[in-house]
Image (tube, rainbow, N blue to C red):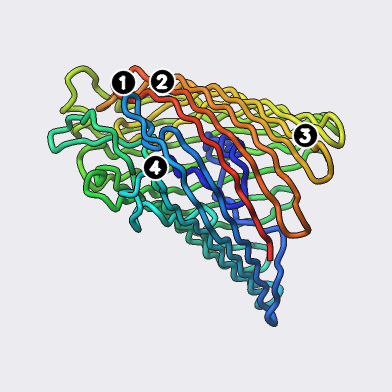
Amino acid sequence: MTAFFCLASPLSAQIDKTPDFAPFILDKRVERENYNFRFGPVVVDVIGTFGIEYDDNINTSEVSPLEDLILQPGVSFGLKWQFNESNELDLNIGAEYWYYLDNSDLNSSQNQIGLSPNTELSFRVLIADVVLRFYDRLQYTFDSADSVFIDEVGEVSPEDPKSFTRFRNVAGVQSEWFIGENVFSGQLSREDIWSTSKDFEYVDMHEYKVALNVERALAANFVVGAGTSYSTIDFDQEVNNDGDVFTLGPWFDWKITEVIGLYAGIAYNDRDYDVGALTDTATKSFGDISQEQDYTWMLRLSHAVNEVFNHQVEWYRSVSVSNTANFNTLDGLRYTCAYNLTPRVRLDGAIAYEENESSGGLLNDDFDRWIVGLSTELVLGPRLTADVGYRYIDKESVAAFQSYEQNQFRIFFKYDF
């Protein structure tokens, strides 16, 4: 079961997410387009949603896939309170309720109410020329694509979990200040991940991160920058190793012409992990890399062909913390496009190929994956829109029981009050 929802996005957009490949990608502030109610200094935005989704492999299983038709009513709520010119409070909540028509055993509170990544409370304050933002972002998801059952001695079960439930909370402070023509930004944050199920307590972890970025516009169409970060990873249980990561790298954003843009960034990473956890000692065939120096990058070329058609291609390498190893290295190539067929109809498409290499650990989940997404957005009225989308995933893994195919269809209505 893959809870890939994003309360105002079509299906194909779910694969159009920039990987966190470099230190200068900080936690971005949640932005809303419109606010439809005002109460004195407070403005409020309310959006109602309703989705109908068919999924032929909700448990992302290689041998025993389960299919279902899922009803998904939801709400997106935003509040902005402008105290004065220097102080602002923002509250954003995105929630969706899932009801399974066929697999009624999944109709419980743990597998039905999800909180989107846009659920955030933040407070911004301006002190002299420095902008400070204090924020707390909470997310609750349920899926099975990245979940495995692990027993007390580190053996991986061949059983296919139906649901991998977990909270993710990121709290921190960001700052932005100007020195001459240079823009500095920094972040200090803590990320917590914890599962509501005892079967997945091994993923419970805390990550502390400090990051700094500086950028400067060398010309009206050319911006350069550099960033660095240091983070420590601490797991509650000794299934995964603790570790720390140092990252440093440059980037640039170049508007080559009025219709062609190029973004490029590369980062050097120094990873250092402890040894002795189950990812090292419980496996029979694979060890785990404890120290690694590598590079991650993003290269994005975008082209607005005309007023109705635009597209872009991305080549990237990202490295992420793994639930069954020290880290995963993901190489990908992705193409996305959008075509405004009429003022009321937009077509979106995306195709991506990704290759993952695990550092070892319990699964050694090296895989190839294809993802294809198609969707159309229909403007049905001044406040009502509909998205009709399809997504296909084909994952081929060298690890046992980790390969799967999945087809997802979704009709998604959005009403902006």
- What's the CA distance linking mark 1 and mark 2? 8 Å
Nearer to the camera, 61 or 13: 61
- What's the CA distance linking mark 1 and mark 3? 39 Å
Q: How many numbered callouts?
A: 4
Lower position in the chain sequence, tag 1 or tag 2: 2
Q: Residues within 10 Å of mark 4 (few under 14, many from 20)?
A: many
Lower position in the chain sequence, tag 1 or tag 3: 3
Lower position in the chain sequence, tag 3 or tag 4: 4
41 lies left or right of 187: right
Identity, as a three-letter code, of the amino acid under mark 2: Phe
Q: Position of residue 159 (x, y in %)?
A: 24, 32
Task: Tell me which residue sits at (54%, 27%) in the image.
Answer: 371
| Secondary structure at numbered mark 4 | strand
Nearer to the camera, 67 or 179: 67
- What's the CA distance linking mark 3 and mark 2? 32 Å
Q: Are marks 1 and 4 in contact (CB under 8 Å)?
A: no
Q: Which residue is mark 3?
A: 339
Q: Which residue is mark 2?
A: 367
Lower position in the chain sequence, tag 3 or tag 2: 3
- What's the CA distance linking mark 4 and mark 2? 19 Å
- Of badges 3 and 2, nearer the viewer stands 3
Q: Are marks 3 and 2 in contact (CB under 8 Å)?
A: no
Q: Which residue is mark 1?
A: 399
Q: Position of residue 72 (x, y in %)?
A: 50, 52
Q: Which residue is mark 4?
A: 143
Q: Is residue 359 visible in this depiction of the protein?
A: no
Q: Residues within 10 Å of mark 3 (few under 14, many from 20)?
A: some
